[in-house]
Amino acid sequence: MKRLKELFRYPVIGIDRILSSGIRWQLLFLAVVIAFFILLFIVIEWVTGCTLTIKENEPRNILLDVYYHFADPGNQYVVEGTGNRVLTLFISITGSVLMGGLLISIFSNIIDRRVERAREGQISYKFKNHYVIIGFDRMAIGLIKQLYRKAQSDNRVKDVPYLFVIQTTSEVETVRHELLSKLDAEIDRRTIILHGGRDSREDLEALRLPYCREIFLLGEEGETDHDSVNIECVTLVNRILRNCYTPKNLTELKRLVNDESVGCKRCHVLFEAQSTFAVFQRYDIESVFTRRTKDDNTWYDKMREAQGNNQTALEQLALLKESYDRITAQPIDFLPFNFYETWAEKVLVWGKYDPHNDDVKPIDYTPLDGEGIDYESDRYVHLVVVGMTSMGVALAMKAAHIAHYPNFVRDSNLKTRITFIDLNADTEFDMLRGRYSVLFEQCDYRVVDTIDPSRSYVSEGKGKEIVDIEFEFVKGAVESRPVQQLLVEWANPDCRSLLTVAICFEQPQKSIATALYMPRCVYGKALSILVRQNVSCSTIELVRQAAQYRQLRAFGMLDECYDTENNCMQQSMRVNFVYNKISPEEEDWRPLDDGVAEALWKSLMTVHRWSNIYNAHSIPTKLRSFGAEEPADLWNDSVLIERMARVEHNRWVMERLIQGYRPATVEEEQMVEFEPDKEKRKKKKKALEQDIFAHICLKPYDALSKSFKDYDRMIMKYLWRINKPLAE
């Protein structure tokens, strides 16, 4: 009605807006014009007394007379009389223009605009049971391949017109061509691309998020504010789901409770910056936009009031509310990930790159400790990272998480060494030290300036007895003579180090050149030489066919990064189960219940999940150190358990230091330990950790109380059982 009012007020502007607007308004405009002229001619025929009847001996019907001539100009010859024929002529011409020309033009325009909107990704459909990918980059290709295989195994591919819905701000035609070049036709025809921004609620609602299976929030390539927009998008997604899951009446409440698609959606969110990703590992920020609030239950009070004193209806409503609360307690399961962190895990933890492409063979990566470092070993790990890029830092921090070995318990000089080589190592280190200030207060590190040796220095950390990692920062170009001499020293056959070199430049060609022209002795000494590539691993795979370059391994490819199924999720859940459900005082094995473990996991905040995940990441390293199979009489082997507990404590200390926790002061520790009330003591300890980021257990293992030692011993007793395919 508003547009019609505008039409009468500003005729030209109104008509232009209607003709250039949606199909509905164009058809309505045409119908109004046709009705107007038919009515006009009826009035004229009635006033003038003209007779336009077509059939002989038929009674006069003004409406039919006008309609017949309006719809079919070929009936003019039947009309007799000059005045009647003139009126018939005007009616026929008007009908030809409106019913023939304008009507056909509008329908032709409808088809053309439909095709155009489809090509531009402007049409949304009633999607259901689909995967949503918000944003498009190279990572999306490998992700779609994974999800398609997963759907095939679930028998959900057959006769499905759509499976993947991609939303992007890029040109839809460009994205479609890229998909066609990388994906099979079977996958491509089940992929629908929509144009829209992930910061627009209207565009997100077109994705039908409440009816999807999973959400993957990737973002677009080359964005300067990538992470901020992703956080805003998660907030919008959460709000959309909460509003959609708010029932308006009892019938809708029943539908929500019985609809299988309703409930918590797994929302995988890519954070480009490691600093942003670290925030979500450290704080419970996601609770702001995942949990439902009391205000979300106002609908329930209104429904109770509507039922009055009907006890049967009130009881039914209460039961439905209970089911509803269980299903919608958490609209999204927030799963943040980072490209660099994911690749570091793939290379250093699981040691395998398994592309979802039948034409590319998997790549196996050698562990940092080779076949393992046991208690009696005199070897130590030395990781050399060439290029202090985001990827290089991620590899170094992942190594710091997992590279903890029992021989350090015997000899504190056998520390894992992590060396960075970069032309700007001094300034890059200053930035790194600002980010991990607590870590570098406790660790030993040294800065070697090969350009100006007078600027080199050594710093001793405070945590000599609790930190088994040391860092080294070498300033200089990797191709320079002083740096090459250092590489030769590290590759000396008499050196006890287990050497791994990771070349992490952003430019693939520079990484390849550096890998091919290293000192010859490095190829013989290094367990592996990791070479960062952005798109394809084919060059490195071809080069490593030569015997000299057999240790080269490509990593860091963009298209095959994120795995939808986390390799260590089951182990992480079991670690959490052991900590929460098994008491250190128990004197015999207790079965691990995966069902209970999964339920406990769902209630965990992201920050606590990551603590268990990092524990699980260390399992392969521990198994190489202590044996792949569980010892026969492990429960009574107190010596082995004590060694394992010390290693676990060293690992946990490094985890906490990386996350930014500092050792508690004597006063802070006494404030907690001298509190006689158990509940108050627990609250003070929690406040110390969450508010001040200090921990009373960041100290040597021997200085821990028996209760804290028992937890380390307990988790180590269950190490092999946590790692088994099926819980026992």
Image (tube, rainbow, N blue to C red):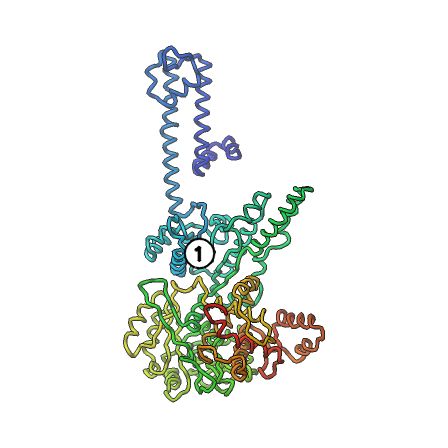
Q: Quadrant of residue 21?
A: top left
Q: Who's the residue at 47% across and 58% down the image?
A: 217
Report the side of 187 relative to 229 (left or right): left
Where does residue 435 sit, x and y in percent of width and height?
Answer: 53, 72
Q: Image height check: is 23 above or below 687? A: above
Q: Nearer the viewer, residue 89 or 523?
A: 523
Label 1 neighbourhood size at 10 Å, few (<14), some (14-19), many (20+)?
many
Q: Quadrant of residue 23?
A: top left
Q: Nearer the viewer, residue 530 or 614?
A: 614
Query: Which element type, helix, strand or loop, lies under badge 1?
Result: loop
Q: Who's the residue at 47% across and 56% down the image?
A: 215
Q: Image height check: is 512 above or below 20? A: below
Q: Amino acid at mark 1?
A: Gly
Residue 223 visible here: yes
Residue 611 visible here: no
Where does residue 325 sit, x and y in percent of width and height?
Answer: 59, 53
- The residue under label 1 is 135
Where does residue 464 sit, x and y in percent of width and height?
Answer: 55, 84
